[in-house]
Amino acid sequence: MNGLSRLARRFVLMLGGEITQSAFHFGINIVLARSLSPHDYGRFAILFLVGGLALTYIRSLAGVPATITIPAHAGRRAARGFDVTFGSVAVVLSAAIAAGVCGTLMATSDINAVAGSLFVGLWSLRSYLRLALFAKHRPAISGLGDIVFALSGTALTLGMIHFQGAPSLDETLFCLAFANGLGIVASLALLREPVRLSLGRSVRRRYGALIPTLSWSLINVTTANVQGQGQSLLVAAIAGPAAYAPMAATFVLFSPLRLSASALINMVQPEVAGHLARGNFRLARRFALICSGLLGLGCIAYGAIILSTLELIEHRLFAGQFVGAPMMLIAVAAWAIVTVSLIHAPMRVLMETMQEFRPLAILAGVSVGVGAVTVVGLLLIAQPAWSLFGVLISEVVVLVGCLWMLKPWRSFRPLMPIDHPRDVEVGMSR
């Protein structure tokens, strides 16, 4: 009973932080969808999508390893070593991603490259810090950092609206970058631990020992991104930002579902890692399947509310900006895509925690092939909105594959504890 109440408190803290930051993201998207042209809002949505993709690489190459290793060594000196290792890697990756975004924007877009790169880079770094705090069982600090991020971003946005009307795209990106930076500073200040970054020999050796496993993790996250978001970028590239804008705006309506899923998964993953380390695969799988069931029920209820009020949302919330788009078709497709993707998300996280990156990468590759062919075919013969059903087919392939790989009769070899690089190589490689 004490364990359940502890999990409930952690979930409330995590969900509070997720709600706060996601409410701000939701609000800024609605403001821009109402005030910018469909072309400009489409460009913002594409850059926002790129930022979301960057978060998956930070999570895979630094966040997930931290959630696996740090809880297993809580209270020991090794935990601090892993904390420094993954924190340093996260900083390097965030800087590299920001540099890549900056170069791409300078070459291909008139969006302010500095604003866009700072937004993506600082968002990525704050995302890692949140995962590291969850791994340390410090969800309250993570939640307070989210609140600082959301409140500062809201204040800056309202200030711009008050003094000059609707904010421009570049001003919004600077606002988001600054708010993410404040969230990072607040979390570190509340943690009250010295910030240590290092690329020394011990850090390189510790992280280098993980390369065999992380290489498959990298392949897995890349194929998963192509599977999950590649089709959306394909639609944007072929149909253009203006055609993509109503789809992006509709997906924003379902962001509360994603935030609930994120909070639930972030809470459960350290527990799942602990059960796996003790060889209790059945309990870890039960956690994942319960999460999938809860998310599925939530998606069904929430989607019914959205569809029943869609006409009001279209005219009031979006101010009739997408009056020519088939919004009901887009909403039904988005609802189905989000529902299926959130149902299989806990299963994917369980398999990632088990370091089953190779089968996940293969599964994502198969779904990419099926989805991309379907999306392109639908774009050639129908309106862009119909191409979303190609994305749905891709998600269904992943769901079926995850259910098959987590079948009850599956054998499982428990994770080995990680104490030093040699143990890492033995315990995590497949």
Image (cartoon, rainbow, N blue to C red):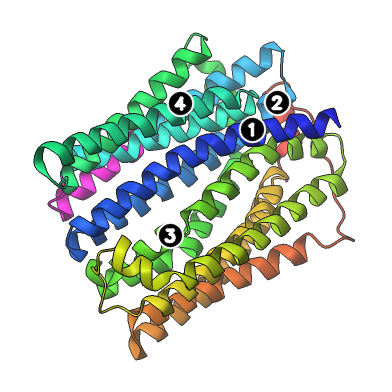
Q: Where is residue 129 in the image (x, y as percent from the top left)?
A: 49, 28
Residue that mark 3 sits on: 253
Q: What residue type is labelled 3?
A: Leu
Residue 316, compared with residue 26, is above or below; it is below
Dot 4: element: helix
Upstream in sequence: badge 3 or badge 4: 4
Q: In the displayed structure, does residue 158 sit left or right of residue 19?
A: left
Left or right position of 386 against 105: right
Whether residue 110 is in magenta: the answer is yes
Percent position of residue 288, x then y: 74, 51
Q: Position of residue 95 (x, y in %)?
A: 34, 32
Residue at left offset 50%, top offset 41% = 19
Q: Is residue 425 above or below residue 323?
A: above
Q: What residue type is labelled 4?
A: Gly
**Label 1 sits on residue:** 67
Give the crowd class for mark 1: few <14, some 14-19, many >=20 residues within 10 Å: many
Q: Quadrant of residue 137?
A: top right
Q: How far apart are marks 1 and 2 (CA)?
A: 7 Å
Disc nearer the start of the sequence (3/2):
2
Residue 47 against residue 192 in the figure, above or below: below
Task: Provide the major secondary structure of the magenta segment.
Answer: helix
Report whether residue 337 is seen.
no
Callout 2: helix, strand or loop? helix
Q: State the quadrant of the N terminus.
A: top right
Residue at the spot 52% in from the left edge and 69% down from the top edge: 335
Check disc 3: other Cα within 10 Å, few if <14, some if 14-19, many if 20+: many
Residue under pointer 4: 145
Mark 2 and mark 1 in contact (Cβ < 8 Å)? yes
Give, as a single range, the part of the protein colored magenta. Answer: 95-112
Asked if the residue at tag 4 contacts the one at tag 3, i.e. Cβ–Cβ closer than 8 Å, the answer is no
